[in-house]
């Protein structure tokens, strides 16, 4: 949400209503103070048509919701920093307005839900339960470890993938291509121009595999070879073997 723009819209409504104190309304980068002003001077909007009064009230609701979400994000970060500094859960309990260390832990986990997005297909906000937050964190750890393993494997066979990719690109003009194959070969060429990091090695391997799949699909769909020369056929076969 562009909070500054929303505050600007709210200010415009107060100006349209000829609010005599509108010059005292804080600027867009002071959302909290601007909302306090709008709440205090809501009567000034009674000069506006009903639809504009409703728009102003909804804008205030929307901005308070934005601030609430932002405050949870920042409080979760403050809790993380406190824990990193060695603050115990029992010492965090009064700061989080709870009575027990376990309650402080559970509240902190619920706050973390505001900072997490479930990155599975059809992503939804993480449910505000300690169990849902822990499950999301554990899945992300697994994903990170899987990516690390993929990088390690890509690095180990990088000396094979690089020449195979270069060879396939050299014979690109001798391949039957569709839009999908063109796209993935472009990706291969892009990353191949500067392939030095583990992440780039993984990308090259994946793009080359996708290009091979696209070319194989062409052969399956047309019942004809995707390579028009022997050299191109050997280049495609080498890439497919990898």
Image (spheres, grey):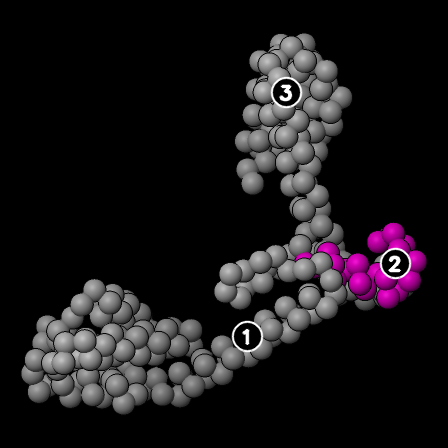
Element type where label 2 sits in the image: helix
Q: Which residue is pictured at 66% across the width and 26% down the height?
A: 57
Q: CA distance from mark 3 to mark 2?
A: 41 Å
Quadrant location of the C terminus? Answer: bottom left
**What is the x, y in percent for residue 229?**
7, 83
**Magenta-tinted stretch:** 94-113
Task: Give the number of marks.
Answer: 3
Q: Between disc 1 and disc 3, whose residue precedes?
A: 3
Q: Which mark is residue 187?
A: none
Residue underneath mark 3: 53
Quadrant location of the N terminus? Answer: top right
Which of the two residues, 217 or 32, is positioned nearer the viewer here? 217
**What is the x, y in percent for residue 230?**
8, 87
Based on the picture, tell me whether residue 3 belongs to the magenta stretch: no
Q: CA distance from mark 1 to mark 2?
A: 32 Å
Q: Quadrant of residue 184?
A: bottom left
**What is the x, y in percent for residue 140?**
59, 71
Other-residue count near label 2 (Cα within 10 Å), few / some / many at <14 / 14–19 / ≥20: some
Q: Looking at the picture, does residue 57 appear above or below residue 120?
A: above
Q: Looking at the picture, does residue 22 appear above or below residue 186?
A: above
Q: Which residue is pictured at 67% across the width and 60% down the height?
A: 127
Q: Which mark is residue 93?
A: 2
Q: Looking at the picture, does residue 143 appear above or below residue 124?
A: below
Element type where label 3 sits in the image: helix
179 left or right of 38 in image: left
Q: Which residue is pictured at 58% across the width and 77% down the height?
A: 142
The main secondary structure of the magenta stretch is helix
Q: Between disc 1 and disc 2, whose residue precedes?
A: 2
Residue underneath mark 1: 144
Element type where label 1 sits in the image: helix
Q: Between disc 3 and disc 2, whose residue precedes?
A: 3
Q: CA distance from mark 1 to mark 3?
A: 49 Å
């Amino acid at each position: 949400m562009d909070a500054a723009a929303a505050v600007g819209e709210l200010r415009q409504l107060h100006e349209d209503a000829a609010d005599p104190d509108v010059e005292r309304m804080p600027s867009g980068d002071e959302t909290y103070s601007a909302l306090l002003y709008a709440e205090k001077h809501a009567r000034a909007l009674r000069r506006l048509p009903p639809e504009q009064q409703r728009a102003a009230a909804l804008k205030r609701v929307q901005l308070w919701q934005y601030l609430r979400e932002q405050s949870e994000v920042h409080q979760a970060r403050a809790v993380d920093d406190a824990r990193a500094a060695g603050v115990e859960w029992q010492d965090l309990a009064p700061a989080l307005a709870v009575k027990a260390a376990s309650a402080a832990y559970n509240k902190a986990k619920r706050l973390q839900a505001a900072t997490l997005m479930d990155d599975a297909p059809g992503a939804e906000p993480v449910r505000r339960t300690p169990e849902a937050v822990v499950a999301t964190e554990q899945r992300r750890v697994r994903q990170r470890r899987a990516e690390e393993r993929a990088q390690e494997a890509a690095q180990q066979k990088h000396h094979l993938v690089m020449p195979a990719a270069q060879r396939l690109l050299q014979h690109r003009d001798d391949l039957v291509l569709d839009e999908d194959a063109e796209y993935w070969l472009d990706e291969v060429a892009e990353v191949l121009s500067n392939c030095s990091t583990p992440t780039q090695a993984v990308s090259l391997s994946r793009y080359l595999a996708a290009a091979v799949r696209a070319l194989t699909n062409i052969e399956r769909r047309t019942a004809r070879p995707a390579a028009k020369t022997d050299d191109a056929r050997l280049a495609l076969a080498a890439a497919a073997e990898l």
